[in-house]
Image (cartoon, rainbow, N blue to C red):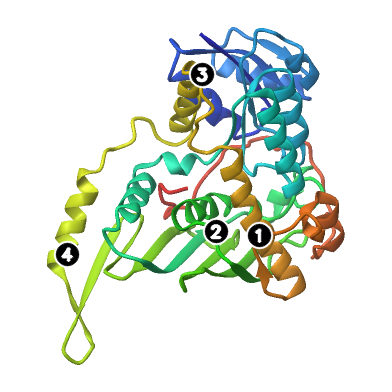
Amino acid sequence: MIKVAVVGTGGISQAHLEAYSFFPERCKVVCICDIYPEKAAALKEKFKLDCDIVGEASAVADRDDIDLVSICTPPYTHAELSIEFLRSGKHVLVEKPMASSLSECDQMIAAAEQANKILSVVGQNRFRDPIMKLKQLLDAGAVGKVLHAQVESHWWRGHVYYDLWWRGTWEKEGGGCTLNHAVHHIDMLQWMMGMPDTVQAVMSNTAHDNAEVEDLSIAILSYANGALAQITSSVVHHGEEQQVIFQAEKARVSAPWKVYASLSKENGFPERNAVLEAEIEALYGQLPEVPYSGHTGQIDNVLTAVENATLNVLVDGHQGRNTLELITAIYLAASTGQKVQLPLQPDNPFYTREGIMANAPHFYEKKSSVTGFAKNDITLGSDYTEIS
């Protein structure tokens, strides 16, 4: 039986607790930790848990009966907590984004390697059928070389969203919609296409004058093979329509799932290739479905690794770092107005959290700070899709 602690009781912690509840024969939540014990007590009651409640992370690190820790705290705490738990001999599953800087990511990876423990970064959308199948289809070469990718990470958040005490600052949240919302889609993109050579970007704060960070960014990625990609990250899009589209040599495929293939007429104009579309549809339909979806799928993956005494998880620290490096490059490009070459080096000003805080634009100063909302239900737009 794997003993689990959940640290942090914000909205996302419930996804972890629900996921762990799917595997009562494999794991048991023995501890919930939060600086506000009453919030931990409310979760304990809601999920009918037989567990301890503690207020300090050190109380989790000091325990010998905990095997795995889910970190569900604000981004600026991820590195410190992960390193503390890894050094105390525990496996770690840390929420997105992995950390506030590449420097912190490197320290986390080093701590995991030294402790010989799992460091997994939440990328729950990889564990959804449309994404997993799309990845396998691209890897199989069914549509040929990808020529262009289009990522639309469209969310909507009201003005008061950034009133929460840790949101809306470079110091504590680490960034705006690019880091904290589009991270899911950017993770999908780099998983499927790899890392680009260069990044160009712009960003703005168009509707949230109570936040230092951006609420809209647009990036263009260039790859060594000539392919291009574009990423729109937003919390100002009503309806929250989201998609990842790959235009390849033979066909267009996407999540949400759609396929369209063209043939060239004698004059170069297109006609629909229904035969190829049917072949791709058949291949897509034959691909295996994930046994568990979202956070439940990722926690199953981590539990399996713990049970098998392996460090092999789908989203490890290196994968989490890749995603953050791409996001950091977007911030660097948007802040300087210059084309950014990857990989980023340790002497880059945006390599550290302090460097980002000093060099990223502060669109507005944070005006309000509340410890929590009376109701913190997570709602999604009517056109929100299952890829996020």
- Looking at the rendered structure, the kind of residue marked 4 is Leu
Please give the name of the residue rendered at 78% of the width and 33% of the height, measured from the top-left corner: 80
The spot of residue 340 in percent (x, y) is: 68, 69
Query: Residue 218 or 383: which is nearer the viewer?
Result: 218
Q: Are marks 2 and 1 in contact (CB under 8 Å)?
A: yes
Instruction: Write down the residue under mark 1.
Output: 343
Instruction: Write down the residue under mark 4.
Output: 276
Q: Which residue lies furthest to the bottom in this view?
A: 267
Crowding at mark 4 (Cα within 10 Å: few <14, some 14-19, many 20+): some
Q: In this rendering, which labeled residue sits more in front, label 4 or label 1? A: 1
- Looking at the rendered structure, the kind of residue marked 3 is Ala
- Looking at the rendered structure, the kind of residue marked 1 is Pro
Instruction: Write down the residue under mark 2.
Output: 195
The spot of residue 96 in percent (x, y) is: 62, 42
Tell me: 4 left or right of 380. Answer: right
Sequence order check: which comes first, mark 4 or mark 2?
Answer: 2
